[in-house]
């Protein structure tokens, strides 16, 4: 009798469990735009950086998690037209002053919790790893199921990841905030 009851409980729990699915992003359509401004005057720099790979976790038709790997070697600056100056800035961003790309060629965003505010508006909690340091971030996003896209805009305080070059902590030249505009196609 005990064995029969145990088997029934296991079967019932299996029937109620919906398997999670992984939905890979299309890295050719997904994009990350970055921007960083100066503290005391308008303008700054902006560009793009590429995803290496990524996926959403889907349960019962809703996003519940995910993981996205960013290729730090793909950093591009779009606001400087002079090739030599542009290359100099990009190399500087890749130096130990900023992202130390030779030592840390990848960054990662791991979605830990998703709260649906309605069918298209999400609040996402995630862990962002930059330079081997992982910290929590929180942002809002919109999902368009017809286009199979998730979009978001958010900022981080770069000093939390010990990216302190010309920070307001030191001399006030460059804002501590880095802005991101992200489109994830899946």
Image (cartoon, grey):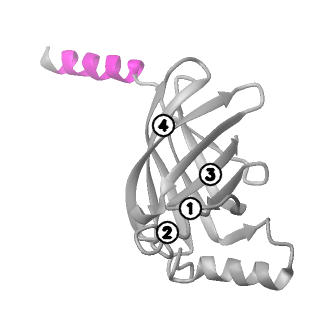
Q: CA distance from mark 1 to mark 2?
A: 6 Å
- Do the residues under discs 2 and 3 have CB atoms within 8 angstroms? no
Instruction: Name the N-terminal-most of marks 2 and 3.
Output: 2
Q: Secondary structure at mark 1?
A: loop
Q: Is residue 156 above or below residue 186?
A: below
Mark 1 or 3: in front is: 1
Magenta-tinted stretch = 3-16
Q: Residue furthest left?
A: 2
Q: Is residue 157 above or below residue 65?
A: below
Q: Residues within 10 Å of mark 2 (few under 14, many from 20)?
A: few
- The image quarter containing residue 86 is bottom right
Q: Main secondary structure of the magenta part?
A: helix
Mark 4 or 2: in front is: 2
Residue at 86% x, 73% y is 81
Q: How far from the left and from the top, in percent, is residue 67?
A: 52, 50
Q: CA distance from mark 2 to mark 3?
A: 21 Å
- The image quarter containing residue 83 is bottom right
Mark 2 or 3: in front is: 2
Instruction: Name the N-terminal-most of marks 1 and 3.
Output: 1
Q: Check disc 2 and report the residue beneath it.
A: 172
Q: Check disc 4 and report the residue beneath it.
A: 124
136 to the left or right of 79: left
Q: CA distance from mark 1 to mark 3?
A: 17 Å
Instruction: Name the N-terminal-most of marks 4 and 3.
Output: 4
């Amino acid at each position: 009798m005990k064995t029969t009851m145990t088997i029934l409980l296991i079967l019932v729990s299996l029937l109620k469990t919906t398997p999670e699915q992984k939905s890979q992003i299309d890295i050719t359509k997904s994009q990350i735009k970055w921007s960083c401004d100066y503290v005391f005057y308008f303008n700054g720099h902006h560009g793009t950086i590429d995803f290496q790979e990524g996926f959403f976790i889907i349960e019962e038709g809703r996003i519940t998690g995910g993981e996205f790997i960013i290729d730090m070697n793909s950093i591009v600056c779009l606001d400087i037209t002079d090739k030599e100056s542009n290359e100099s800035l990009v190399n500087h961003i890749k130096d130990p002053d900023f992202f130390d790309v030779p030592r840390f060629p990848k960054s990662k965003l791991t979605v830990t919790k998703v709260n649906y505010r309605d069918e298209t508006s999400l609040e996402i909690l995630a862990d962002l790893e930059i330079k081997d340091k992982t910290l929590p971030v929180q942002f809002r996003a919109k999902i368009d199921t017809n286009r199979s896209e998730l979009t978001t805009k958010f900022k981080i305080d770069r000093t939390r990841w010990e990216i302190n070059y010309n920070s307001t902590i030191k001399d006030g030249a460059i804002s501590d905030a880095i802005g991101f505009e992200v489109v994830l196609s899946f």
